[in-house]
Image: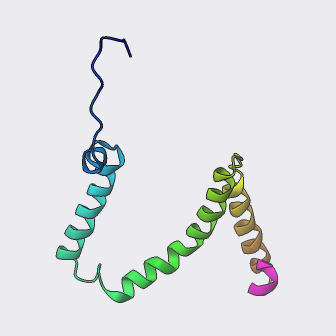
């Protein structure tokens, strides 16, 4: 900043939130959820929300592990490929006649 240039005023929290790039993404998500809830009554049902939570829990577990790795300064993006390899190997073992528990451990 040049010595004769006036200082820029600091933006408040609400102004920073509105100028953030993620605000549009969150806004679009909220609009989609509201529209789907209005036009598809089963979308916001307890059973559907529990089913979504159950299906997304696996991704959430991997996401938490990856977040810990990245927060500590490491860059290890191989977790997704290891997860995929484990899924394919477990499916192949179950196809060959192994039970679910031995194939997944």
Q: Against 72, is 49 above or below?
A: below
- Of residues 51 and 62, the one drawn nearer to the viewer in this rendering: 62
- Of residues 11 and 49, the one drawn nearer to the viewer in this rendering: 11
- Seen at 59% across and 72% down, the residue is 58
| In the displayed structure image, the side of residue 95 where residue 58 appears, left or right | left
Quadrant for the N terminus in the image: top left
> Does 75 lie within the magenta span?
no
- Seen at 79% across and 79% down, the residue is 103
Residue 80 horizontal/vertical position (percent): 66, 57
Residue 24 horizontal/vertical position (percent): 29, 49
Quadrant for the C terminus in the image: bottom right
Q: Against 24, is 33 above or below?
A: below
Magenta range: 99-105
Residue 32 horizontal/vertical position (percent): 26, 63
- Seen at 77% across and 68% down, the residue is 89
- Of residues 90 and 72, the one drawn nearer to the viewer in this rendering: 72
Q: Against 77, is 44 above or below?
A: below
Residue 71 horizontal/vertical position (percent): 64, 52
Instruction: Decide if residue 51 is in sight here.
Output: yes
Instruction: Decide if residue 98 is in sight here.
Output: no
- Seen at 51% across and 80% down, the residue is 54
Q: Which residue lies furthest to the left in this view?
A: 38
Circle count? 0
């Amino acid at each position: 900043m040049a010595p004769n240039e006036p200082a820029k005023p600091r933006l408040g929290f609400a102004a920073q939130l509105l100028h953030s790039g993620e605000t549009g993404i969150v806004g679009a998500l909220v609009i989609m959820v509201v529209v789907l809830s209005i036009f598809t009554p089963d979308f916001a049902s307890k059973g559907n929300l529990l089913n979504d939570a159950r299906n997304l829990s696996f991704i959430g577990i991997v996401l938490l592990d990856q977040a810990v790795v990245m927060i500590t300064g490491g860059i290890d993006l191989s977790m997704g490929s290891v997860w995929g390899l484990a899924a394919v190997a477990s499916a192949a073992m179950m196809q060959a006649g192994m039970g679910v528990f031995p194939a997944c451990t």
